[in-house]
Image (cartoon, rainbow, N blue to C red):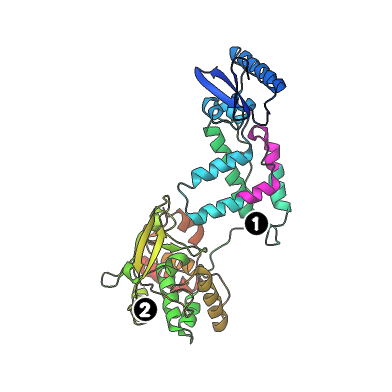
Amino acid sequence: MKTPEGVEVRNNSIRISFTYKEVRCRETLKGWTVTKGNIKKASNLRSLILSEISVNEFNYLERFPQSRKAQQLSSAEQKASAITLDQLIDQFIELKSLTLSSQTLETLIRHFDICKKHLDTSALISSFTYADALIYLKALKSTISNRGTLRTPRYINKHIHLLNQCFELAIRAGYLKANPFSNIERLKSDSTEPDPLELEEFNALINASINPQFKNMITVAVYTGLRSGELCALAWEDIDLEKGTLRVSRNITAQRKFTTPKNKKSTRTVFLLKPAIEALMKQREFTYLKRPQEILVEQKGSTELRKDKIRFVFTPASKTYGYYLGAVYSVAWNRTLKKVGIKHRRAYQTRHTYACWMITKGANLSFIAEQMGHRGTSMLEQVYGKWMESHSHEQITMLNQKIS
């Protein structure tokens, strides 16, 4: 079949060709059946495109939104006129997947799933305004979460921050000039203060008739400040009792995946206090001679997996896994508190206990930050500086000695 210039029939479809920015472009007209009428319309479309190119009004993405060539040859402004929030979110997740662990990435995707319930993510990003951002904020505050409760200010702030980051990507890519989420005021939240164990409570736990291995685990937790995932993933290969050190090199997630620690600073050497060394010495008789297990450790910021052949320090009574999961550890912790009659608090409070005890004992803040894997001392000053009344007499004694 004879066709007009720049129009051809290929595999029962019609394709037009033209030159744009000195590049030869070919585009198949999807859904156009091969008829004389459609071939004539294709020729007319090509003529219109050539006319738009000649007066610098051709928008490749508007004409062919699925075209790879359009993506290559379109300006940032033209891309912005065609990109939807869905597409921007996909780009953001793809970029983040290069540096985030699988657990953090899954959390990120769940946050965006909530965004999609309250925002029209099929809309162009250029159509979003500051008013849309406020409407979204109101929706998060007034609707019920999947747990059947209202969302906390802290949780809502995370969502707004996430969308702010997403639109910042659009600005840096040149898609937009203004970020509708940049000036949203953060909601004020009631700060959750640490609720550390008092010394009397800790002693009651240790002196109670509970599983001796779990006693050792609690003691190590309180006197090292390890995160729960770090504690559960601890291996004898990480410990040097002669030097009195412990190397934090892995973590276990809620999804039962082993990863490297939370951040670069969290891969650290912890100098063991005497009670921790004594607890580990006692724990040796239970797990030190167990057969090593081979596990895969996900390297954060990489697709690589590290093979570790290790003996776990703490193992639960259940034979399901040869190591503690965070949830199993929490259940054992809650059960123990109830048995001893101590006020309920999360297992993570052992980390708060370490920080508060060290601060009230006058330890150097930089040392404590290094031990806990913090980037600096600001977290200690803002979050962990809770005074514990049981240590007041010690501080008075110390001050009296210095004053004298």
Q: 73 and 150: which one is in front? A: 73
Q: Where on the picture, by quarter, is residue 5?
A: top right
The verdict on residue 155 being magenta is: no
Q: Where on the picture, by quarter, is residue 398?
A: bottom left
As measured in the structure, the alpha-carbon distance from the residue carrying label 2 to the one carrying label 1 is 42 Å
Residue 331 spot, x, y in % from top left: 55, 75
Disc on res. 398: none
Quadrant for the C terminus in the image: bottom left
Residue shown at 60%/39% (left/top)?
87
**Mark 2 vs mark 1: which is more N-terminal?**
1
Q: Is residue 227 visible?
A: no
Q: In this view, does 10 lie to the left or right of 207?
A: right
- Please tell me how crowded label 1 is: few (under 14), some (14-19), or many (20+) other residues with Cα within 10 Å: some
Q: 400 and 335: which one is in front? A: 335
Residue that mark 2 sits on: 287
Residue shown at 71%/38% (left/top)?
131
Q: Please name the amino acid that badge 1 sits on.
A: Thr
Task: Report the magenta stretch's main SS.
Answer: helix
